[in-house]
Image (cartoon, helix red, strand yellow):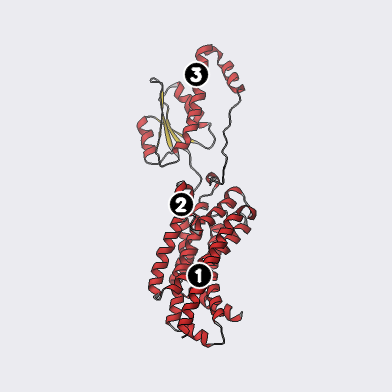
Amino acid sequence: MRAVLAIATMNLRRLLRERSSLFFVFIFPLALILLIGATFGGGVERSLTVASGGTALGEELTAALADVEGVEVERVDTAGEVADAVALGRATAGVVVDAEAGQVRFLTRPSSTGPALRSAVDAAVARVSTRAAAMSLVGPGRTGLVDDVLAAVPAVAVTDARIGGDPSGLDDLGRFDLGAAQQLFLFVFVTSLSGSAALILSRQLGLTRRMLAAPVTTAQVLAGEALGRFAIALVQGLYIIVGTALLFDVAWGDPLVIGVVLIVFCAISAGAAMLVGASLRNDQQASGIGVMAGLGIAALGGSMISLDFMTIGMRRVAHVTPHAWALDAVAESVRFGGGLGDVVVEIAVLLAFAVVLLTAATWALHRATVRTAS
């Protein structure tokens, strides 16, 4: 066991001695999470720019929209100002009231969250229209009666529900929460694959031959290399989790869930790194292929474009990667308060990935080690 720990410690020390590795392992992930959170993060902003047209009906509709919870209303004078605010992204959506024509125009960009505000605007228009119709029937002197009747009518509440585990709950996420989980699994996997070059370099420099010349068995060398890859991935993963929690107040959900998911995912990353390192003979080739393959698999698995924004077909394709299953487990814990019992399926699939990769990597690395020794 001492030999295994010594080999693993050697791999970890080699990583910490390289300045470029320190940047990509410790500095770049947090910087990227900060950039993504500052640019795209935060809860869903809902703001309306309204041009009331200066009429009583328009002012009443503007007041009704201002009463909608979670919606910020900005008043402007002209329809052109509304269109500019929406087009330039200063407002989520816009409303233009044309009382003379009896029209209310709703403006939004299809790629924004503006369409979600349409129901709030429709409800406000319905309330104002109902009140205006009632006033026209009873006369202007019965305003108090109309308001009392409308107040007595119970409001119909529409609530969201989650069916079949479909990801939702995005409104409850903090500015950096979504991007942090994606970057965690991306960097742990990519760093592990790019580090596979160290396995090839060890063979080229004769380090593996020297280890086998000592009273160390091939099994101990394999276990030490596997433990070294695992330790590197785990150190980076823990650093990202603790660093984002302290610096950006990222919520990681149940510590037991994120802990188990991280450990299994680090085993997957270690297995993938060993498999690449044992299959190739050139360290530069391994670094390039490792980075490209790591980025491609991570992108497919939802670490660049969230699974929430993928089509159903693409989500199914994404789940051929371990990243998608790991992100599903974290989402269940962070968004819905799920515990370890709620992510049993995800963890079982991740364990299957780990077993297959580690078994294949051990076999391939054993062949490469024996070939080096001979």
Question: Are the residues tagged 1 and 2 within 8 Å (C-beta)?
Answer: no
* Of pointers 1 and 2, the one earlier in the residue sequence: 2
Residue identifier under label 3: 132
Which amino acid, mark 1?
Answer: Ala
Q: Position of residue 207 (x, y in %)?
A: 47, 83
- Residue 147: give x, y in percent of width and height: 57, 20
- Amino acid under disc 2: Ala
Camera sees residue 279: yes
Against 46, is 343 above or below?
Answer: below
Look at mark 2 in the image and give the residue it sits on: 38
Residue type at mark 3 is Ala
Viewer-closest of 119 and 134: 119
In the rendered image, is residue 63 in sight?
no
Badge 1: residue crowd in 10 Å (few <14, some 14–19, many ≥20): some
- Residue tagged 1: 360
* Residue 285 falls left or right of residue 303: left
Residue placed at 49% from the left, 43% from the top?
44
Q: Nearer the viewer, residue 196 or 47?
A: 196
**Nearer-N-terminus badge (2/3):** 2
